[in-house]
Image: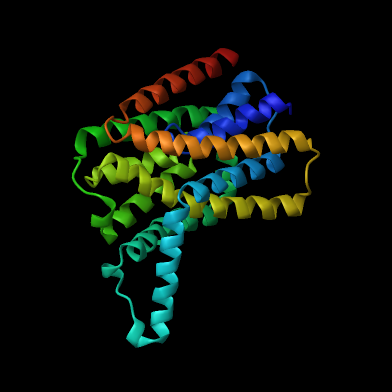
């Protein structure tokens, strides 16, 4: 893998993880369309670490507040006089909603890991699933109302968004697209839907990274140039940080329809190439 390829794939991973157009779909389709070799497990682990680093850095204040509230709540379990109510602490409620929303994808992904690993290698599946992402985005814009914010979210919201995140295990179904759409179906404002989606992504990406690291340790590190790994890490981290910042500003006043249109176009191009090469 060349440095240029590493930079491109790092940018794709960091950007499309949060722009609702499917990072997994792009990481399968773009190397396939360009005739590149698979980036390999070592590189995949590195760009995942870069992506997680970007999330943690961008939302570091929120993470510190949530972890502090969680530790205070745990301490209150052993000291009744210091007990904290989940409904009275917004940061505690938020981290509990994130934990609730993470459970479905973690359980399903763990139980059917081998099946999804096979599915992730099929470009046709990724191309078709981009249409699912487009449908979710279009329908959520049509149905959802700009009414509620994160502090107004309830347990049902976290459960529904978490269940929708399960769809994103399939390549081509955008994780951010599915979770933003689910939040919009629940009448949560676009910017708040995106913010919760991005925070929700961290545990799942960290979990995926741990699984990949375990697999890497079992199979051995592949011979990848250090320069390529560094380039992939830096570009994944930087694109994650700046895309989150840009998208949160964008969604304050604009809809997700352009991303749905992009998914349709990308799917049709990929399908055309797929059937042309057969």
- Which residue ends up furthest to the right in the rendered image? 223
For the N terminus, the quadrant is: top right
Name the residue: 44% across, 18% down. 268
* Residue 36 location, quadrant: top right
**Where residue 161 appears, x then y in whole percent?**
34, 50
Horizontally, residue 143 falls left or right of residue 177, namely left
* Residue shown at the point (50%, 15%) measured from the top left: 272
What residue is shown at x 62% (from left), y 24% (from top)?
Answer: 32
Q: Position of residue 271 (x, y in %)?
A: 49, 20
Residue 92 visible to an observer of this rendering: yes
Q: Nearer the viewer, residue 83 or 60?
A: 60
Asked if residue 228 is positioned above or below residue 197 in the image, the reply reads above
- The image shows residue 153 at horizontal and vertical percentages of 26, 56
Q: In this picture, is 142 found above or below 187?
A: above
Residue 95 falls left or right of residue 212? left
Determine the residue located farthest toward the front in the rendered image.
Answer: 61
Picture coordinates of residue 39, whole percent (x, y) = 68, 33
User: Along the line of sight, which residue is nearer the eye, 121 or 237?
Assistant: 237
Place residue 276 in its image quadrant. Answer: top right
Tell me the quadrant of the picture where the C terminus can be found: top right
In this rendering, the count of numbered labels is 0
User: Splitting the image into 4 quarters, where does residue 155 fall?
Assistant: bottom left
């Amino acid at each position: 893998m060349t440095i240029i390829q590493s930079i491109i794939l790092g940018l794709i991973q960091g950007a499309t993880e949060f722009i609702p157009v499917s990072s997994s779909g792009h990481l399968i389709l773009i190397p396939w369309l360009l005739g590149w070799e698979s980036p390999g497990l070592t590189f995949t682990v590195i760009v995942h670490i870069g992506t997680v680093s970007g999330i943690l850095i961008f939302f570091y204040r929120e993470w510190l507040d949530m972890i502090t509230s969680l530790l205070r709540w745990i301490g209150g379990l052993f000291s009744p006089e210091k007990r904290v109510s989940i409904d009275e602490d917004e940061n505690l409620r938020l981290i509990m909603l994130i934990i609730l929303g993470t459970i479905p994808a973690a359980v399903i992904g763990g139980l059917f890991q081998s099946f999804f690993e096979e599915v992730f290698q099929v470009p046709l599946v990724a191309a078709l699933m981009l249409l699912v992402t487009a449908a979710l985005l279009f329908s959520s814009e049509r149905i959802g109302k700009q009414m509620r914010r994160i502090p107004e979210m309830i347990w049902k919201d976290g459960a529904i968004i978490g269940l929708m995140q399960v769809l994103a295990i399939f390549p081509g179904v955008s994780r951010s697209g599915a979770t933003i759409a689910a939040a919009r179906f629940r009448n949560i404002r676009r910017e708040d839907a995106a913010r919760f989606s991005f925070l929700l992504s961290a545990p799942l990406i960290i979990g995926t990274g741990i699984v990949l690291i375990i697999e890497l340790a079992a199979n051995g590190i592949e011979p990848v140039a250090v320069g390529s790994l560094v380039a992939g890490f830096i570009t994944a981290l930087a694109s994650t940080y700046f895309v989150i910042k840009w998208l949160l500003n964008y969604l304050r006043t604009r809809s997700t329809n352009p991303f749905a249109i992009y998914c349709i176009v990308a799917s049709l191009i990929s399908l055309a190439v797929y059937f042309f090469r057969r």
